[in-house]
Amino acid sequence: MGDASLLRPGEAVLLVDLRRGKRHLVTLRAGQAFHSDRGFIPHEAMIGLPEGVVAVTTKGARYLALRPTLAEYVLEMPRGAQIIYPKDLATIALFADVGPGQLVVEAGLGSGALTLVLLRLVGPTGRVVSYETREEFARRAQRNIEARVGPGAPLTVRAQDIYLGIEEREVDRLVLDLPEPWRLVESAARALRPGGVFCAYVPTIPQSQRIHEALQTHAAFALVETFETLLRPWNIAGPSVRPAHRMVAHTGFLTLARRVQPDAGGSPGIVPSAAPGEDAEPTEDPGPEVA
Ligand code: SAH
């Protein structure tokens, strides 16, 4: 890639304090400097170098300079609303099956973390439409998105209350991160194309139960499932190989469903699939009760 791979002015760089692990997102600009409590690093000391270099402050503190991955970027970018965490973003990507060329509708835009993931997945031939009622959140999210992917992303922001209706039709995927997704089941059924995926992210189980039951009793939805994703970091340092003492133990629950032909849906629920290698049918010895 030649010089294009070297760090350039205008680029966002993640500086990781090699002693304390603290991370800083910095936009490189000639003439500016990164200041820490242990001296500073002129940006010129990083511009023109390959990522992965160690930059040293005037007082000898060492910082690793890397272009942030998308997961690192969403964690460090300025927030208005609480973001969806990378473990849940990754889960949404595959379970809601977001891919190239799709029309994806989401709400709300929030800080734009989920939007950035959706934009990456739909690619230049797809489109993301994002509803957001709060203007200041929408502005900040758009700044975050432009700083990451530049201008001209295939994104339409609607400064509208999505509970009043979804304007789009033949939508491939609908991803909701707002408090009362059950209010949208009816308009989701009209907006999603047959086979489309409905996905809602909510922080509590009463909300999950309500959206799950609303989808399960609607004739146009089937294969409703609700789950959470736990990510437990491990400490691996010599003889100390064990789970880390701290983890993000709770973020939210996902509820997914498929848009089907009327009457194919509204089922009382499906039998959870068997574990790999197990029979779906109960056998004589069903083993330990898991349900
Ligand atoms: N998924 C986002 C965070 C969304 S936070 C991210 O990863 O960054 C929830 C957002 O939904 C808030 O910004 C809130 O203003 C917006 N919101 C809540 N109710 C809404 C509604 N009825 N219509 C549109 N946006 C709504």
Image (cartoon, grey):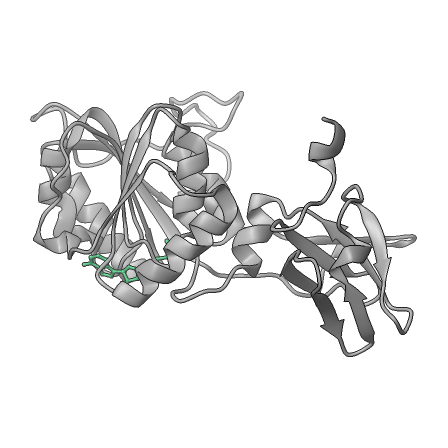
In the figure, is residue 248 to the left or right of 272? Answer: right
In the figure, is residue 43 to the left or right of 183? Answer: right
Q: Which quadrant holds residue 144? A: bottom left
User: Nearest the camera: 2 or 97?
Assistant: 2
- Does any portion of residue 54 appear in the rendered image? yes
- Give x and y (percent) for residue 157: 26, 48
- Give x and y (percent) for residue 33: 73, 67
Q: Which quadrant holds residue 243? A: bottom right
- Give x and y (percent) for residue 78: 49, 64
Residue 47 vertical placement versus 289 (above, below): below
In this rendering, the count of numbered labels is: 0
- Give x and y (percent) for residue 76: 57, 60
User: Nearest the camera: 156 or 239?
Assistant: 156
Residue 222 vertical placement versus 145 (above, below): above
| Quarter of the image with the C terminus in it | top left
* Residue at the (45%, 65%) spot, across then down: 79
* Ligand 1 image-quadrant field: bottom left
From this viewpoint, which residue is outermost toward the bottom?
37
Residue 122 vertical placement versus 239 (above, below): above
User: Nearest the camera: 96 or 54?
Assistant: 54
* Residue at the (76%, 44%) spot, across then down: 51
| Quarter of the image with the N terminus in it | top right
Q: Which quadrant holds residue 104? A: top left
* Residue at the (84%, 65%) spot, across then down: 19
In the figure, is residue 263 to the left or right of 107? Answer: left
- Does any portion of residue 217 appear in the rendered image? no
* Residue at the (33%, 63%) spot, across then down: 137
